Image (cartoon, rainbow, N blue to C red):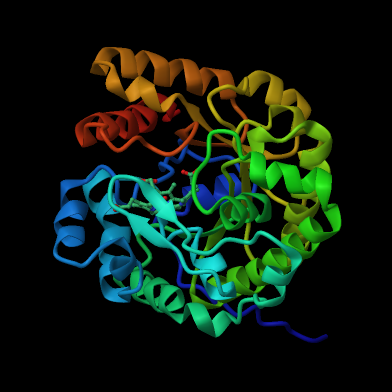
Amino acid sequence: MSFHIVPIFAAMLKNDLILKAARGEKTERTPVWLMRQAGRILPEYRAVRNSLSGFKELVETPALAAEVTIQPVDILGVDAAIIFSDILVIPEAMGLTYEMVEKKGPHFPKTVEKAADIDKLKVADPSDLSYVYEAIKITKKELDSRVPLIGFAGAPWTIFSYMIEGGGSKTFSKARKLLYTDPEMADRLLDMITKSTIKYLKSQIRAGADMLQIFDSWAGVLPPEHYSRFSLKYIAKICDAITEVPITVFAKGAWWALPEMADLNCRTVGLDWNMNPKEARKILPNKTLQGNLDPCALYADNESIKQETKKMLDAFGDHPHIANLGHGVYPDTDPNKVKFFIESVKELSTH
Ligand code: CP3
């Protein structure tokens, strides 16, 4: 008889509620975190950010990125940290640099307009993003196993949109046009982004990320057929390649894609506030669901926040659930309201 000693790679986490929920296990209460919790709302974040030249310097300075990653754990009491970075580091590592324009958002001085522009890009080399892995390592050390650390990347379609549009857009018509006029070119770029993202996420895991989320922020602008063909297909490749840790896929606005998402190799599906948790549960009986309080509910008074939180928890029922908002927390939200939401989830979901 031979003995197999199972090595314990990761230090035991003191609070692993999110990982348990992501694995579909029962938890003593519903875990909670917020998309875009790092930055945006905390004055403590602003203080660090204002001491620097801008957003990018913060992203590229690992010790400070780690500091603002941990702030919401200390200040808000969330059950997970998410590494402070941006989805746009991938296009940059592929050769398309971005600027973060104060109060406006991201801007790409050069965009992809024609096939020759793709020839100038490369599949990102994981070493191009070593500042992110360094930030993950520092964060893990400083978190000292208090809560799990979430790594992330943008979905290929969302990254593709930025590389074509050069920034945000109301219609995404340049990016969407290409899907009709030159699908081969679109596939070539989406494939390069997908390969870059897989390497990047694997490096995040090696650095210490306990779970991952893929943000498909602009999923909702595509017609269903294009969504399967140009977005989900590439998300599926990423999910198939990542076997080490649980993945969450958040496809904002793509309610019609939920049935197809049942077949993704991901543990958790994120819902936005337009989606009905009860319907989603019927469609996805075997996934953990995440979400989905309307971020605007946090503008209301505490009593209403509690009522809305209760309604949300009831709608998700007694199935594996990770409480969150239906999209990132809005920048002008009062941090005390966020804290109240988190405390309400903890109180109302304790059995
Ligand atoms: O969740 C977290 O708190 C971790 C950090 C994080 C940031 N961006 C930091 C950030 C994450 C997960 C992202 C993801 C991201 N970035 C997405 C997907 C999520 C979503 O909300 O849909 C998208 C679409 C982007 C692109 C991006 N970055 C935009 C449109 C902007 C400008 C507007 C804004 O505030 O979101 C950014 C800038 C950015 N990324 C900030 C932060 C904290 C604000 C910049 C600042 O401090 O001035």
Please identify the quadrant where the C terminus is shown.
Answer: top left
Which residue is painted at 35% across and 73% down in the image? Answer: 60
Which residue is painted at 71% across and 62% down in the image? Answer: 114
Please identify the quadrant where the N terminus is shown.
Answer: bottom right
Which residue is painted at 41% across and 43% down in the image? Answer: 33
274 sits to left or right of 84: right
Q: Nearer the viewer, residue 351 or 79?
A: 79
Q: Quadrant of residue 84?
A: bottom left
Q: Quadrant of residue 201?
A: bottom right
Question: Residue 272, image x and y in percent?
Answer: 56, 30
Q: Is residue 263 visible in the rendered structure shown here? A: no
Question: Residue 251, image x and y in percent?
Answer: 63, 40
Q: Nearer the viewer, residue 63 or 120?
A: 120
Q: Nearer the viewer, residue 191 or 318?
A: 191
Query: Please, is residue 233 above or below residue 185 in the view?
Result: above
39 sits to left or right of 187: left
Question: Residue 56, image x and y in percent?
Answer: 34, 66
Which residue is painted at 45% across and 24% down in the image? Answer: 294
Q: Quadrant of residue 332?
A: top left
Query: Please, is residue 232 above or below residue 113 in the view?
Result: above
Q: Is residue 169 visible in the rendered structure shown here? A: yes
Question: Residue 83, image x and y in percent?
Answer: 41, 61
